[in-house]
Amino acid sequence: MYTIFSDTYADENGSEHTGYGIALYEDDGSLKLEICDITTDKDDITEFVKKLNRYRPAMVHLSDVIIDFINR
């Protein structure tokens, strides 16, 4: 299952922002994958994670799916 997490990140100028990422958990609850700071838009990442959980893309395609989300 994919979930959302957030953290505070600083850019090269020292400006801080809240970034949202995704985590993928196995059925047994163990963490399989975590990708940080994909977007600063909570609503967008929420919809994205709903789609990931609905369509469950194969891991081999996940990087392409995330790149498509970022570049939309």
Image (cartoon, helix red, strand yellow):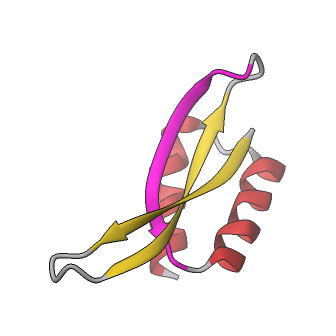
Q: What quarter of the picture does the N terminus occupy?
A: top right
Residue shown at 51%/78% (left/top)?
40
- Left or right: 72, with 50 as reference point: left
Q: Does residue 70 sit above or below 3 in this rendering?
A: below
Q: Where, by quadrant of the figure, is residue 45 drawn?
A: bottom right
- Left or right: 66, with 12 as reference point: right
Q: Does residue 28 sit above or below 69 in this rendering?
A: above
What range of the chain is rendered magenta? 29-40
Nearer-the-camera pick, 23 or 62: 23
Q: Does residue 46 sit above or below 27 in this rendering?
A: below
Q: Position of residue 64 (x, y in %)?
A: 47, 56
| Residue farthest along the left direction in this orientation | 12
| Residue farthest along the right direction in this orientation | 54
Residue shown at 77%/60% (left/top)?
51
Residue shown at 70%/48% (left/top)?
3
Secondary structure character of the magenta stretch overall: strand
